[in-house]
Image (cartoon, rainbow, N blue to C red):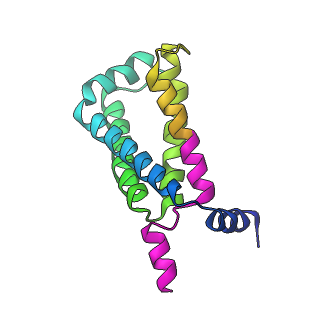
């Protein structure tokens, strides 16, 4: 049994049911962020172009925003229902790290920068659910139980 399998087994054995409610709320937050990205792509493009960390052109910024929005929409739904939760969480982690490092920190570490604090909280919860998995109230659990 390798380290990843040991972590998955420990997470499956030590998952409280109230964590499923936290997982569902986390999925809703990620899903609504995906909707917000799709709703206002112009402002997001300006942020990417003005920060010019990666030297994005307008077209490249638009493609990046749509890929991230798609990952948030699909990942949020998967996290909400608890289907392949660990995979969905792993896809979200690099996106959140990039958002924290390249977008949210540019506004500073002030207590008023609520977007940074929300991103940090979501990142911590993503790492938590990467370890503990989807829990007993999930599609993953139903599939395991039927096997």
Q: Identify the residue shown where x is 36% and y is 46%.
A: 28
Which residue range is magenta in the image?
124-147
Count of residue discs: 0
| Chief secondary structure of the magenta portion | helix
Quadrant hosting residue 97: top right
Q: Identify the residue shown where x is 43% and y is 56%.
A: 79
Q: Residue furthest bottom?
A: 147
Q: Is residue 95 magenta?
A: no
Q: Is residue 142 magenta?
A: yes
Q: Position of residue 41 (x, y in %)?
A: 27, 30
Q: Residue furthest left?
A: 39
Q: Which image quarter is the N terminus in?
A: bottom right
Q: Identify the residue shown where x is 51% and y is 68%.
A: 136
Q: Nearer the viewer, residue 30 or 106?
A: 30
Q: Position of residue 126 (x, y in %)?
A: 54, 47
Q: Position of residue 131 (x, y in %)?
A: 63, 56
Q: Position of residue 75 (x, y in %)?
A: 40, 53
Quadrant hosting residue 56: top left
Q: Does residue 33 lie above or below 147 as drawn?
A: above
Q: Identify the residue shown where x is 29% and y is 23%.
A: 43
Horizontal relation, residue 2 to residue 119: left or right: right
Q: Does residue 82 lie above or below 92 as drawn?
A: below
Q: Does residue 119 lie above or below 143 as drawn?
A: above
């Amino acid at each position: 049994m390798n380290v990843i399998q040991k972590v998955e087994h420990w997470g499956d054995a030590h998952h409280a049911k109230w964590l499923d409610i936290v997982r569902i709320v986390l999925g809703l937050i990620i899903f609504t962020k995906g909707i917000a990205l799709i709703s206002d792509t112009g402002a997001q493009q300006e942020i990417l172009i003005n920060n010019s960390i990666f030297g994005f052109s307008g077209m490249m910024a638009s493609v990046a925003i749509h890929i991230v929005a798609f990952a948030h929409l699909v990942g949020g739904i998967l996290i909400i229902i608890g289907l392949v939760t660990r995979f969905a969480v792993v896809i979200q982690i690099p996106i959140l790290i990039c958002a924290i490092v390249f977008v949210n920190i540019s506004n500073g570490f002030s207590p008023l920068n609520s977007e940074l604090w929300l991103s940090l909280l979501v990142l911590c919860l993503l790492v938590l659910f990467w370890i503990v998995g989807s829990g007993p109230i999930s599609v993953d659990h139903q599939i395991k139980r039927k096997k």
